[in-house]
Amino acid sequence: MPCFNEEVAVAKVVKDFRAALPDATIFVFDNNSTDNTVKAARTAGAEVYREKRQGKGYVVRRMFTDVDADIYVLVDGDATYDAPSVVPMIKRLLADRLDMVVANRVDRDEAAYRAGHRTGNWLLTSFVAAVFGPSFNDMLSGYRVFSRRFVKSFPVLSGGFEIETELTIHALELGMAVAEVDSPYYARPKGSASKLNTWSDGFRILRTIIRLYRAERPLPFFGAIGLMLAIASIGFAIPVVVTYLETGLVPRLPTAVLATGLMILASLSVAIGLVLDTVTRGRREMKLLAYLALRAPGEERRRR
């Protein structure tokens, strides 16, 4: 059942960001709402676009495709993020010529950040840091400021809430200049429910990390699979070899065939990793060239 507070939250977000950035154009992307959110957003002064495919990733893809600007501010429309923080975030982006500034959420209400979400965020952030290098303290923050060259060189592949993970890994993979700025984080308005599910969305994000690891680090990924297969092959082969050395016979022919097959698969896995590593390197170079072809923040008159 639609909740009136969803409309109030969107209108509040538009008004707050209008006050913080009076010269900015504010866009609200409606993702199949069934209440009066669209009307509330337009009344508050926002331009409204619609994205029929359900999922935050599809919405962000539409945003990055349709909106042309020099500085982009991405924020959830649930009135939990602090609008005045956008000013220091943009200043930091311009002063240090960064490509992304992430709001590190500092909760102001006990109910703002549920324990399950906090734990999941920490686990996923730690995993990404271990795999892709030092990351952010709040990798899943939905409040970010981007440069034009980040947005226009970012190939959005995710369809759901795992989009924040993809944004983070894209920046880490290309070695972009990024930063975090502490920002207050508030509880959702009463009667408003989060669309996040701790377990299902957490598994989707973890699956996205593994998929991106396979795509961006194919040699370690397939090398690890090859190593496990090789260890299993050696484990099966040892008794066969010992028996052969003692008797000159191979009585466990199926085991010998299994060990041989596993070693062949191990070799193929490593070979696939080597080939894909070369392909990935070329793809990464192409993304980097597309990124470098765009102007840096502050080179021309800024439009937010």
Image (cartoon, rainbow, N blue to C red):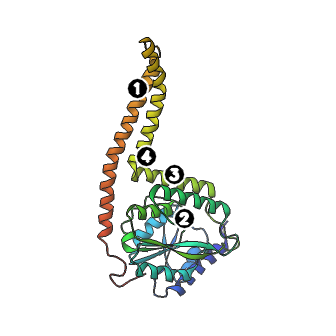
**Is 119 situated left or right of 24 in this image?**
right
Q: Which residue is mark 2?
A: 140
Please state the horizontal and vertical placement of residue 41, each as a whole percent of the image. 55, 78
When the figure is inspected, residue 58 is found, relative to residue 259, above or below; the finding is below
Q: Which residue is mark 3?
A: 207
Alpha carbons under labels 4 and 1: distance apart: 22 Å
Counting residues from the start of the chain, the first of labels 1 and 3 encountered is 3
Mark 1 vs 3: CB contact within 8 A = no
Counting residues from the start of the chain, the first of labels 2 and 3 encountered is 2
Give the numbered dot on residue 260.
1
Q: Quadrant of the N terminus?
A: bottom right
Q: Residue at x 44, y 17 (%)?
A: 253
When the figure is inspected, residue 212 is found, relative to residue 177, above or below; the finding is above
In the image, 187 versus 41, the foreground residue is 187
Q: Nearer the viewer, mark 2 or mark 1?
A: 1
Mark 4, other Cα within 10 Å: few <14 / some 14–19 / many ≥20: some
Q: Which residue is mark 4?
A: 221
